[in-house]
Amino acid sequence: MLARLRKPTVSFVVGGALLFVVVQLLLSLGVLNNFWRGIIYWGAALTMVSLGLNLIYGFNGQFSLGQYGFYAIGAYAAADVTWRWTHDDASGIIVVVFGVLLALLLYAVLSRILRGFYRVTVMSKFTFYVIVTVLAFWLTVQFLVPVLSPVVTGLLGALPAAISQQVVFFIALAGGAALAGITSFLFGIPVLELGSDYFGIATLGFTIIVKVLLDNTDTILPFAEMKGARGMIGIPQWTTWPWIFASLMLVILVMRNLLHSSTGRAMASVREDERAAELVGIDVAQAKILAFVVGSIFAGLAGGIRAHDLAFLHPGSFAYIQSFNPLIIVVLGGLGSMTGTLITGFLWILLLEGFLRLYLPQGFETWRFVVYPMVLLLMMLLRPEGLMGRHEVAFLRQKLPAMLKKPLKESGDRGADAPAADMATGVGEVTA
Amino acid sequence: MTQGRPDNLAAEVEAQPVVLEVDAVTHFFGNLRAVHDFDLTLRHGELAGLIGPNGAGKTTVFNLITGVYPPSEGSIRFRGVELVGMPSYEIIQMGIARTFQNIRLFSNLTVLDNVRVAYHPHAGYNLVDSILHTPRYRAKEAEMTERAQEFLAIFGLESRQNEEAGSLPYGLQRRLEIARALAARPKLLILDEPAAGMNPQEIDELLELIRFIRDRFDLTVLLVEHQMRLVMNVCEWMTVMDFGEVLTRWLPSQVRTNLQVVEAYLGRQAV
Amino acid sequence: MAHSPAINLGDGESPQPANNAALHRRDGMILNRISQGVFVLMGLVVLIVLGRALWQNPGVFVQQMLNGLQLGFIYALIALGYTMIYGIVKLINFAHGDVFMIGAFTSFYTISTFQLHRWVTWIAPGLPVGIATAIGTVTVLIVAMVVCGILAVFVERFAYRPLRNKPRIAALITAVGVSFFLEYFGGLPFAYTSNYITYTRPFDVEVYSAGTVSPVLMGAMWAIFVASSAAWLVLRALGNKGNVRAKSLQRNPLLLFGLQFGGFLSVVLTLVGIEIQTGGKVWDLSVSNVALVIMGGSILLQVVLQYVVNRTRLGKAMRAAAYDKDAARLMGINVDGVIAATFALGGGLAGAGGVLYATAYKQVHHLMGITPGLKAFVAAVVGGIGSIPGALVGSLIMGQTEVLAAGFISTPMRDAIAFSLLIVVLLVWPQGIFGEPATEKV
């Protein structure tokens, strides 16, 4: 098994482990103080959002300005789960676990039913999926919560406090991500049909709508603990370096593996030429939804991580202006380059929130937003393809297949038992 | 409508099952009638041409068959299945593949990936395999790659598999497009002006290639073409259309002897 | 190449239809009808809520609609610029809302610092106050329009033009950058500061209500409306008979202006001027001269723009460049110049919008352009991007939606409802109300 590992894989694993240990040591020894810890965590969260956007925009070609909306949904949902848990209320856990499962189950049933019809418009699909979602969560809140509350409390209470806390945190993060994914699925069904610019504007509208809803969580929405425009307080500060590291790695690996598969190629073909993709047999709508949902799940996960680091959430941090942050990071790093996004994502926060804030004179605060756009403009004028273009470090780069070993015989005598080319060797010799 | 086929072909061809049946199809763009009462029957293994002057509605017919837009009236059946109302990708997955008048490759993907994209519906592994890179993913991916490489080898593109498709010379881009179409495992291949922009020598090669792939992959081929050199030599019979209607059906030999008619529809230079 | 026996390179089995379910499908129209029913039901609920509000207090409802009209006409000025710029360079010019803000601030300085709205009284002190104020206001408006026009051209020249042949995202990011730059440069202490600043109006506000609307004015508006609609009908009749001259006169800008100006203002003034009572309650409507100026100015500028785009050489060049830049260039059109002119026109209109907005709401702030800018863009999309009448209609719809949503559905949700309108319209009419359907060549 080990022999099959490629060299880049080995160096990635070793490098990742090293990074994990070093940062953990620096944090434990206090070399990195709370300020720098915050910067690193923030950078990781923003990088995850940006990776998701890169999947949607850089690899699938759908221009989304809505990722901060999903980030917000993930953050608030995860925070609500843990807030309720620390206030002896398991309803959050039940809703995110069983509500989501029930919704997914109903989706599976509904999609089977819809497949039996032709000429179903996207609006109809959208309507039915929304109805089913509302039904799933209504059923959960009405019937499952009262029944399961004592069970869940009992089960988790039986565990040692330290472990149950981690379990709850895991559920909260997964639940926040899942809710972001479900929202993006519902929103994506009709809106992804619109195509590039209109999709961008619609997602911008989505971000604004989410922000307005967050401002009114305690009046229009029934979440008094979120305290509307005053901001949600009392979120347990559970995010630690291992959680950050694990989430970021998970995002990187899922995205890499997805992109290196047939599904990833289908997504890329949609970016290149939607019509041509459809006419070689790609289900374009499905490819778009998939990229959008996966990207939004990343954003939701990042939101949960960020919420439990800050321990405070304010709707102002999810304003539409902020939603340009991931877009800028992705474009600066290079559309279609995970490496570029990883680098610029961290650099963006490190430089702008870290170094500049620390080492520049007081008066610079007011100049920050004047300098950012200048940098952005210069970058666009001088290197519009971004820092990395489409380049990737070896581990994230798709391995180029080796040339066909056995020349094809004229008569085409290939039997069904012909041995598959040994794909696990070398990084492919490229001939010009 | 003239459904009568040239007699000398009839015996051989009529025995084959019908692959595509376009029946009284009419299509409007707004108030413009692009295709009117169009009929076409293709039998297994046929190599048929669709000719006619610019704007006659040839490409529209292709777009109607492949579901780019639904016809205003009429029915299109492929191996007995009604295609009208089906989304394009399902039509393709049922076994119709096409190329485009203006080459539409995925120009930032590699040559190999262009072919592998078309293989996606037959990938044989699911999303979970993709994300976890399971053994099934590895096996199927290797198999898919090898298949795609075989296609490339047939088209003489195997040495350029890792180049970006957009960087290929024009003639090779045309070939790649055909390779990509074949990777979708079609029963019916529709070629929209495959020889556009080619020189006589390239056309001869293409001609060979079209015959070869028809036999090798057991295909039915329908092509639109302006280059009479290609049509005359490769097609077993052809449908002539103008102003969205079928004018007549001929054998190439009949067309050749009826030069005045050809001139009327195709112009003097085309001959 | 030798002809080999026919084999299938696939895995042997002949490719069957991908899913057999596809062969036994039922028609989905039933499902579509159900979902349409759900949508109609939701629309009915909204209508019932609004209808009840109208029934219970018609005076308040109509007053809100009048306020919405004022807002809508301001949006129209911004939306016209958006729609023209998008039409020609396919760029969502995020900085457009900030040009609007600069317009407001320019007029703020010309009024507060330079007192330019009073220049007539310095030269000719004897002139009646009304005329002097009118000329002064127009001066302020023109100054703001010129400044904003120049600013827009400047931005186009140095930020967008170098990127015209680059991927479209580069220009979009640049637009975001320019937008941030204008917003936050404006927020610097030596520029506009980050405070809300009270705006001095170039003229004093007068509120007209029943009894204070001069019957002469009302009559004049009706006269304009009746005269221009009569002329329009006559010309149409003649045009239908084949009179080419009449057909062209039918689109005469003066006539169109008379039609719209007279139409809107006569209805508004009449509603306000006559005392309406229902169910023992007086409607008690009022309208300010600011609102009237906004309506009049917006209609005038919109008609002028229509004239420029449809009837002049520049307009013809614009339409050609919007359709196909390369072909236009080959036809000898100076495409860069045309694009610059488009930005100048759009910027000027946004500047005028800024002045009128500040006059109406009596406050300026360095971030004031963001929300109106976005809403105006939404309005342009709703109306059909690229279409000038569409921008006007979309903006009026937007103004009404926002005001009615705030008044009778949910005040904090007004922005959310306004943007939901965008999503709903895009789904029902992907090209907007007046937009042309996109055609794709395959």
Image: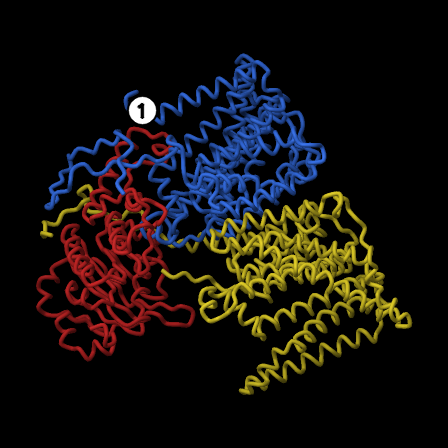
Chain colours: A blue, B red, C yellow
Per the image, label 1 sits on a secondary structure element best described as loop
Does residue B188 lie above or below C413 as drawn?
Answer: below
Instruction: Return the x and y of residue B74 as percentages of the image width and height.
Output: 31, 65
Q: Which residue is mark 1?
A: A5
C248 vs C431, nearest the viewer: C248
Mark 1 closeness class: few <14, some 14–19, many ≥20 residues within 10 Å:
few
For residue C435, above or below residue A91: below
Left or right of B23 in this view: C277: right
Q: Is residue A107 left or right of residue B88?
A: right
Res. C46 visible in picture: no
**Occupied quadrant, residue B150:** top left
Q: How many marks?
A: 1
- Of residue B20 and residue A2, the one placed in the foreground of this image is A2
* Residue C252 point in image, percent of width and height: 63, 78
User: Residue lying farthest right?
Assistant: C126
> For residue B62, what is the image quadrant?
bottom left
Q: Please report, as a chain letter, where disc 1 is located.
A: A
For badge 1, the amino acid type reads: Leu
Placement of the C terminus of chain B among the 4 image quadrants: bottom left
